[in-house]
Amino acid sequence: MKKVVNYLQFFFIVSFFLFSACKSPSDNKILKAGREWTYSAVDYDKLGNVNDSLTLILKVDSSGKKNFFNQTTIIWDYKRNGKVIESEISAADEENNQISIHPPRKLFLSFTEILPFPASGNPGYLTYESRGELHVIKYKDYKDGILEGKIITRYLHAVDTTIYNFANKNYRCWILEGENTNYIEELGQFKCKYLFNEELGFVNLTYYKPDSSFVVIELKSINF
């Protein structure tokens, strides 16, 4: 039941994308079946000290399976000491050079539900912006269900480009920044910065929490 709820929530935030009933998994440029991205995820306190860390593996379902909304099935694996301690099945969408993925939201990443999902917009256009809302139906992972029943509004926009070094090669990345735009008094002001490259996908996801602590998710390796 929880997986179904997750998919329904995902549908609202990516409603600005165009869906194609006849789209084949092979049409994806980045989210190709069987691809994997390995990230480090580090939770820092407001002074920059490490609170927690783990390895995140983002996998595109090897079968190219789609969900009810014709979105690509993805899996987030959470690893410590080489062992998977949590696994999360979710969804992503790729259409017309635009990508949106449901972020990891287990363990110290449960707060990411509040922020706009990582989305590339339309690479090449710094005028990109998205205003969306998320209807949270059932979600116990963050602060004993404080998000349940809320309609959270969020804003994401492209602000600039930057050069990012990965595997000793420089890549141009689009910088997208976002925040929650309601429940500021109750939940606090969360912010995010995403770096997206048209070949690699998302190379960095940085989240800033109301107490000035932050989380950095950084790409370490790929299998393609």
Image (spheres, rainbow, N blue to C red):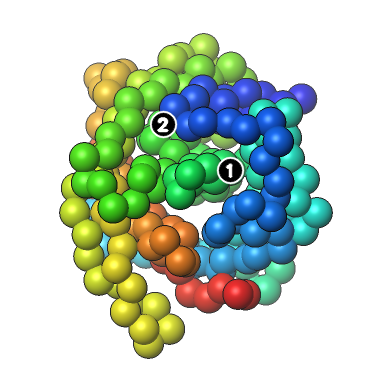
Amino acid type, residue under disc 1 in the picture: Ala
Q: Residue at 65% x, 59% y: name it.
A: 32
Q: CA distance from mark 2 to mark 1?
A: 17 Å
Where disc 2 sits, the SS reads helix
Q: Position of residue 70 (x, y in %)?
A: 68, 34
Residue nearest the viewer, comparing 83 with 196: 196
Where disc 1 sits, the SS reads strand
Q: Residue at 48% x, 32% y: name it.
A: 17
Residue nearest the viewer, comparing 44 with 223: 223
Q: Tell me the residue that label 2 is attached to.
A: 114
The correct choice, above or below, for 90 with respect to 45 in the image is: above
Amino acid type, residue under disc 2 in the picture: Ile
Location of residue 195 by image quarter: bottom left
Q: Is residue 190 left or right of residue 63?
A: left
Location of residue 172 by image quarter: bottom left
Q: Position of residue 36 (x, y in %)?
A: 63, 66
Q: Tell me the residue that label 1 is attached to.
A: 92
Quadrant of the image containing the C terminus: bottom right
Q: Position of residue 114 (x, y in %)?
A: 41, 31
Residue nearest the viewer, comparing 63 with 1: 63
Q: Residues within 10 Å of mark 1 (few under 14, many from 20)?
A: many
Q: Earlier in the sequence, mark 2 or mark 1?
A: 1
